[in-house]
Amino acid sequence: MKRIAAALLMAGISAFPLGAQTVAPSISEDFKPSSLNQPGQQYPQVNSQGYARFRIVAPDATAVKVSLGLGGRGGTVLAKAPDGTWIGTSEGPLDEGFHYYHVTVDGGTFNDPGALNFYGSTRWESGIEIPAHDADFYALKDVPHGRVEQILFPSPSTGTPRRALVYTPPGYGDKPQTRYPVLYLQHGWGEDETAWSNQGHANLIMDNLVAEKKSLPFIIVMTYGMTNEIKPGSPGGLASFDIRPFQTVLLKELVPYVDRTYRTVADARHRAMAGLSMGGFETKLIAPKNLDTFAYIGLLSGGTVGMDDVGATPGFKDKVKLVFVSFGSRELEGNRPPAPGGGPRPDPRANAAAIKAAGINSAFYVSPNTAHEFLTWRRSLHEMAPLLFRD
């Protein structure tokens, strides 16, 4: 488990093309406020090329920097204007989609007062959205919408009620005789159960797919996966992550509660588990060992499944109805670190092809021009959802 965790951490944090403030003349000045700004706030801004511009009011500061990405890697140094504000533009365009960021003022870490906040990297971070050319699939449209609601379920194993967010598809409340499959969808390291609906727009993705009749309607359950409380501020803490407390919460407490509370089809053939990054790591540790609970497995930037895994899991070929694996294209490019202990990393494409050749329903997806980031995972859910529960 430690080796898998280390692999995810080494491959999982992407850098952004940002650096010291140098604005090239070719940058278009068609900047507009980010869609994730606080009401009425003009900054941060994005332009049609994907550049981001920031403005921070800190008249007494001596140095201001904006850091983007998981862990705050990559930065834009802001310059002080005569009016005491600090302004800067990213050195290069950012990948399309959602990005976390925060502001460093004289060594202190703060959120941008102009932007909305999102839970990531074990803290509330500011968020910025670079408009994507294919954003239509997660856009808010005039279609029937499902609901995302909070539930508090008993957890004797942890000694406290725990929270989950549950998406019920359009029409759930109008069809009292209809029962639905369930996808248990996990967030990444440092995030929580709000990530898939807030940053990922999972509900809008599903509303649009169902409206287009591209996906069967199903329930999505999202809960907090860092049950053993990894020490905040240290991604390396994942190396000591113990899956057993979360596995108990999921299998013994949450799944039974959902089956009692919602109109589910309570068997493995109508139950899936998937997750992004650490959530994929959790899925790989839990789902194959519990094929009487989950028949569909999804790893989104969260590892790979090969013939060694199939051979080590009794009943895999007979019980698993789908293995879905996805990555951003930049995650699969060169200069990746070696596998823990040395040697080459497993090739996820080759693994997917091998298990497919062995007669297992396998799907492999690569998100173009994205890294370890939410547009990769939005696209991955959009590709995976139509394949679920078709057997």
Image: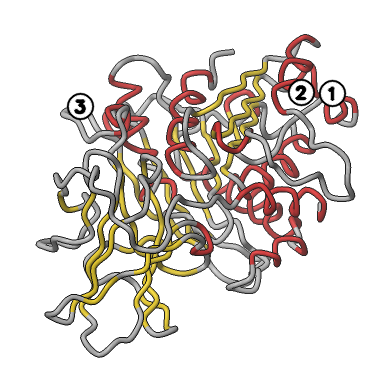
Q: Residue at x 83, y 25 (%)?
A: 310
Q: Quadrant of the C terminus?
A: top right
First-in-chain label (1 vs 3) = 3
Residue indicated by mark 2: 351
Distance between mark 2 and mark 1 Cα atoms: 7 Å
Residue ranking furthest to the front: 25
Q: Residue at x 17, y 82 (%)?
A: 84
Foreground of the two, 340 or 181: 340
Residue indicated by mark 3: 143
Vertical placement of residue 121 versus 330, above or below: below
Answer with left or right where residue 157 lies relative to residue 36. Answer: right
Distance between mark 1 and mark 3 Cα atoms: 42 Å
Disc nearest the viewer among 1 and 3: 1
Residue indicated by mark 1: 307
Disc 3 marks a residue whose amino acid type is Val
Q: What is the secondary structure assignment of the residue under circle 1?
A: helix
Disc nearest the viewer among 2 and 1: 2
Q: Residue at x 17, y 53 (%)?
A: 33
Foreground of the two, 220 or 200: 200
Q: What is the secondary structure assignment of the residue under circle 3?
A: loop
